[in-house]
Image (cartoon, rainbow, N blue to C red):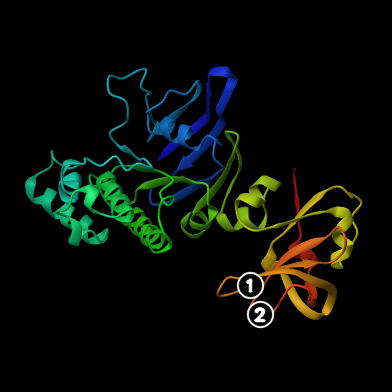
Amino acid sequence: MLTATKLTKAFANDVTAVRSVSLTLEPGRITGLVGASGSGKSTLLNILAGLADADSGEVRLNGERVKGPGEVLVAGHPQIRLVHQEYQLMPNVSIRDNILYAVRFMEKTYRESRVDELLKRCRLVDVQHRQPRQVSGGEKQRAAIARAVADKPAVLLLDEPFSHLDLPNRLVIRELLFELIKYDRTACLFVTHDATDALSIADTLGILRHGRLVQLDAPATVYHKPATVYAARMTGSVNILKGKHLPVLGLPETNQPDALFCLRPEQIHADPSGIPGRVRAAFFRGSHSEVDVELSRYVCVRILTTRSDLKAGQDIGIRVSAESVWPLKS
């Protein structure tokens, strides 16, 4: 188990990248951290991996403090692996040899069987004898993950593992992570700016803004009950409404006219007998359509519907339940 307590890190010009962040990574569980560029995600990973010194706070792995580079000759911790966005594979050796290098001090029979196992799991058998420049980005990413987990570390940290990948490769990496983490009982943390993958595989989801952890909870809770406007927007499409506009949707008035509320598009239903509106724009997404519905001069909401025949200018009715609306902090 890795525990971080009140980590803070500042750079020159009073730029604070990490602000009093506390979290716990448990074996066999995946934690996702979502944040915009510049929110402190990579800095936090480097501190957790022992590759950067925190100004205050501490990191402990199974009760033992993880020392930063200022206290050790070689930065890093032998039981913590960090996979960077650039993969950092050795360029002039094969994919197989890259993975073998991570278990080079182990007994030969085990070493070979472990690499064979990872090549199979990571779907790299067909390219195992190629060099990194001869394989695709998805194969490089899978090779980097395989190398990182080859000697079964206690903690796996991933920096934007999905950012350079197309949809098919994103799905492969997602399934691979889920399988490896659960099978080897590794504690895993990955950071991303896109919540789509985090929501689907994370056991715990955190929202990082300006170096501060503004929410940390189960993915469903963060999605349906975001703590702030930022958390709501970082986890998917959302309608942000002021209290004074709720009656336009047929919802009860509030005594806080300027208070903010969130309403997810899938919580608004098309209903011919509902609140009248007009389609401003419709976007076909395959399994559904995203439709912007204008309800008044000041209120336009996005809804999801399986209808594919809606066009701009059409009249439409919508229905919203009061339980779907969630109050937010700014």
Quarter of the image for residue 179 reads: bottom left
Instruction: Determine whether label 2 and label 1 are within 8 Å by CB.
Output: yes
Which percent across, then down, holds residue 105? 13, 38
Q: Residue at x 33, y 55 (%)?
A: 138
Q: Is residue 117 above or below residue 258?
A: below
Furthest residue to the left?
A: 108
Q: Which residue is mark 1?
A: 289
Q: Determine whether the residue tagged by mark 2 lies in a helix, strand or loop.
A: loop
On the image, the x and y values in percent for residue 238 come to 68, 58
* Quarter where residue 122 is shown: bottom left
Checking the image for residue 22, the label placed there is none
Q: Residue at x 30, y 49 (%)?
A: 145
First in sequence: mark 2 vs mark 1: 1
Q: Residue at x 60, y 74 (%)?
A: 288
Neighbours of disc 2 within 10 Å: few (<14), some (14-19), many (20+): few
Image quarter (top left, top right, bottom left or bottom right) of the C terminus = top right
Where does residue 309 sit, x and y in percent of width and height? 67, 81
228, 56: nearer the viewer: 228
Residue 66 image position (x, y, % from top left): 38, 28
The relative height of residue 174 versus residue 86 in the rendered view (above or below) is below
Report whether 103 appears left or right of 3: left
| Viewer-proximal residue among 137 and 142 | 137
Amino acid found under the numbered disc labelled 2 = Arg
Given the image, on which type of amino acid does mark 1 rest?
Answer: Ser
Q: Considering only vertical position in the picture, is 8 above or below 239?
A: above
Q: Where's the N terminus, which quadrant?
A: top left
Which of 25/47 is in front? 47
* Residue at mark 2 to residue at mark 1: CA–CA distance: 7 Å
* Element on which disc 1 rests: strand
| Residue hosting label 2 | 307
In the picture, measured across the screen, residue 317 lies left or right of residue 26, that is: right
